[in-house]
Amino acid sequence: MQNAKDSFYMTLRTRLTEINPQRTILVRGTVRPGILVEEAEAPFSQFPSDVFVLRWLGLAIDMDLASTMTGEQCEVVYQTCGTQSFGGLDRGRALSAMDEELMTMIKPFYAPKLNYAATPPAAMLTQVFWDEPVFSPIVTQRDRLSRSATVLVYSYQEQGE
Amino acid sequence: MAATWFSAPAPVARRVRAFFAPVNRAAQTPVLFDPSEQGRFSLDAPPAPWINLGWVQDFVRKSASKSAPLMTGIPAAPLEQVRETLEAQVSLQFLSWTKLTMGLATGSQHMNILAPANGAAPAADGAQASPAVIPQSGSTSTSIVLALADAAKFTPGAIIAVDVDYAGQTGYVGTPVAGAYLRQALTDVDYVRRVTFNVALVSQVTANGLTLAEPLPGGVPAMGAKVQTVTGFVDREGGSFYQEWSGLFVMEGSQGERIFFHYPRLQAMAGAEEAVSPLNQKNQGGHSRVLLKGQFLALPVTDPLDGERVACYRSFLPAANALV
């Protein structure tokens, strides 16, 4: 299952760098694409703004198939206060831009499954695939707008996983 | 004092496991299941020649046999009952698409799409095939020995069909399972390999031949068999051939009890049909699983025990220490 999670994240990260290479974040002294996995970073007191944060939540499995299928629920959380140059008045536009980036990142709805524990990452036999994101309503906290989108990520367990 | 028995309620089971075995069409011999000798077999390793088709869902079996009273007297009252017709049906959904499940879930021939020859004219069943190659001696059910030049024609991940050339014969064709019935001679030398169930996936190609990921259903390639690449499968609505298999369905209860439904002769009774099942019931517009629907008519056999004609055997092996 970890390979599916890694593959989903790395796919979105690769696509984000093509869609908006300016969306970055400085993490532990390194500039990275602006998309993180919550469980792979130090705990946040508050989610960083203007980046996508992936949270892995629910898990469902179907063991009656020829290969066990897993469905992992991924919540993509993002928020923004707009830009300083506009005094935050562009926060609605900034959130819309992130909505559109996420919609673009998510397509096509599949990606090769790779084992990122290997160096270089090793291609596996099956693909990871997912449904359309289900977007939540915008949450407003003072000058901060946030939203989350939930995606069900499906994969098949391969031999040795 | 420790109890030595318990009173068992109705069995609690999850899905149904399906096993099929080929009926010898030419000899009209079904495969029998003996619950006394085979009842405790591992569901992951059924006794030969039963083939494990995994879990199925929406398994429904229906008796369509009809009885009628024999009336006598004034006013007429039933004196006896007589069985007017004997009929049973089975329907289910397969959870995978394989050569065998597709073959079972279609009402007619199920064909392999053979890799086409260069420049061949298009055809709905697949164009004229590229020439078959001949396995060398030493081939087994999992290893096909080939000449160096022949081995180079295959790649890992390819599917192969292994069967004899068509030589103008009529009647049932295909080894080890009859894949079609020919009433008149054809001209396609590859026809038997188009309908054969003797297919497997190539896992490795070496200078000496092919290593298969799974054994060929027909075992060691027969004398005169040849090998061709299969690119997919095709079936048709229509046709006059009916697949016939022996079927065994098993429900395993939570206490280890087992219910078997053994149909010695099952014939596909409907054309190819699919059922769509959403992966996420809360998102009906999302990904959906496409399931093969199988519908079968049970044909009777004569039970040698007492000469009765029957279509199905239901066996029950109770849980250990359960009162009966």
Image (tube, rainbow, N blue to C red):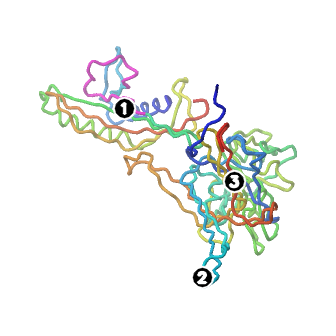
Q: Quadrant of residue A11?
A: top left
Left or right of B250 in this view: B193: right
The label on residue A17 is 1
Give the Cα separation between the discs numbered 1 and 3. 51 Å
Give the Cα separation between the discs numbered 3 and 2. 47 Å
Q: Amino acid at mark 2?
A: Ala
Q: Secondary structure at mark 1?
A: helix
Residue A4 located within the stretch drawn in magenta = no
Magenta residues, start to end: A37-58
Please state the horizontal and vertical placement of residue B101, each as a whole percent of the image.
63, 54
Say which residue label 2 marks.
B76
Left or right of B218 in this view: B223: right
Instruction: Please identify the residue farthest to the front as the structure is shown.
Output: B74
Residue at 26% in and 21% down: A46
Please state the horizontal and vertical placement of residue B110, each as a whole percent of the image.
66, 61
Q: Secondary structure at mark 2?
A: loop
* Labels 1 and 2 positioned on one and the same chain: no
Q: Amino acid at mark 1?
A: Thr
Say which residue label 3 marks.
B20
**Of the two numbered discs 1 and 2 in the rendering, the one whose residue sits closer to the viewer:** 2
Q: Amino acid at mark 3?
A: Phe
Q: Secondary structure at mark 3?
A: strand
Q: Quadrant of the C terminus of chain B?
A: top right
Q: Quadrant of residue A109?
A: top left
Q: Between residue B222 and residue B21, name the one nearer to us.
A: B21
